[in-house]
Amino acid sequence: MGLRVTQYGEGVLHEKGEKITQFDGELKALAEEMLETMHKHEGIGLAAQQIGKAIRLCVVELGEAAHDTGEAVLDGRRIPPAILMPLVLVNPRIELPTPVEMEVMEEGCLSFRQVRGNVTRPIVIEVFYQDLEGVEHHLVCEGLLSRCIQHEVDHLNGILFIDRMEKADFARIRSKVRKLKRLGQADDPLRANS
C-alpha cells in the first residue's frame, strides 16, 4: 500500500527530527513501510519527514546503481555497497574527512514532483548511525550512496535540496518550486485542519 509522501510546502519538511530511543517492532514496521513507499514512487531514498514524522530515520535503496557507486567501508571492513541495500539509518550523523572534495550533480526529491536541480556536495562522507536493533555503525562511502545519504540526512535536519542549490541554479526552477509550495500548502493536513 505505501505511505503518503509529504510535498514541498508542508511544514514537517522543515522540522528537525527527534532522536529515536525505542528500537522495537513498531520502528521496524515503519522502516519497512518507508522502503515500500520509496519503491512505489521509484525513489532511492526517503526520510521520515517525507512521510510526516519528524524523527531521525531514513532509508536508502540504490537498486542497480549500487554496483556503480564507488567504495564503502562498514565498521572498518571494505564491502560492495550493494550488500548494504536496503540501508536503514537510525539517528545518522555525518562527518567529513579532510580534505573535502566536492562534486556537482543533479538531484531530485520525492517531495518535489518533477523538479530537479544541481547540488554541490562532498564526494566522500563518514556516517555514524544505528541499525534497527540499536547497534552503532560507522560507514565511509562515496559516489551516489554518499550523495543519497547526505540528501536524506539533510531532510532529518529540516534542510531541503533546494536550500543547497546555487542561486543561479535555483533561479532556473524558482517558478516550478513556487507552484509546488502552493500545492503542498493546500495538501498539508495540519493547515487543512487549522
Image: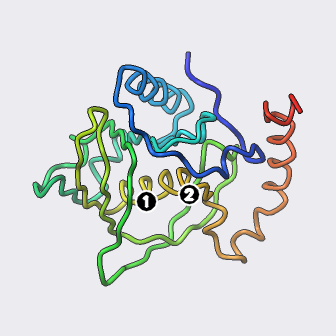
Query: In the image, is residue 5 above or below residue 117?
Result: above
- Image coordinates for residue 84, horizontal then vertical, percent: 25, 42
Secondary element type, mark 1 = helix
Q: Residue at x 81, y 49 (%)?
A: 181
Q: Which label was assigned to residue 161?
A: none
Which residue type does callout 2 highlight? Glu
Question: Does the CB distance between marks 2 and 1 fall below 8 Å?
Answer: yes
Would residue 185 appear left or right of 39 to someone viewing this image? right
Q: Residue at x 66, y 62 (%)?
A: 162
Extreme left residue here? 77
Q: Which residue is mark 1?
A: 147
- Image coordinates for residue 41, horizontal then vertical, percent: 57, 32
Ranked by sequence position, the earlier of labels 2 and 1 is 2
Using a 10 Å C-alpha cutoff, classify the residue at mark 1 as few (fewer than 14 neighbours), some (14 to 19) or many (20 or more). Answer: many
Q: CA distance from mark 2 to mark 1?
A: 9 Å
Q: Residue at x 89, y 33 (%)?
A: 194
- Image coordinates for residue 16, horizontal then vertical, percent: 58, 52
Which residue type does callout 1 highlight? Arg
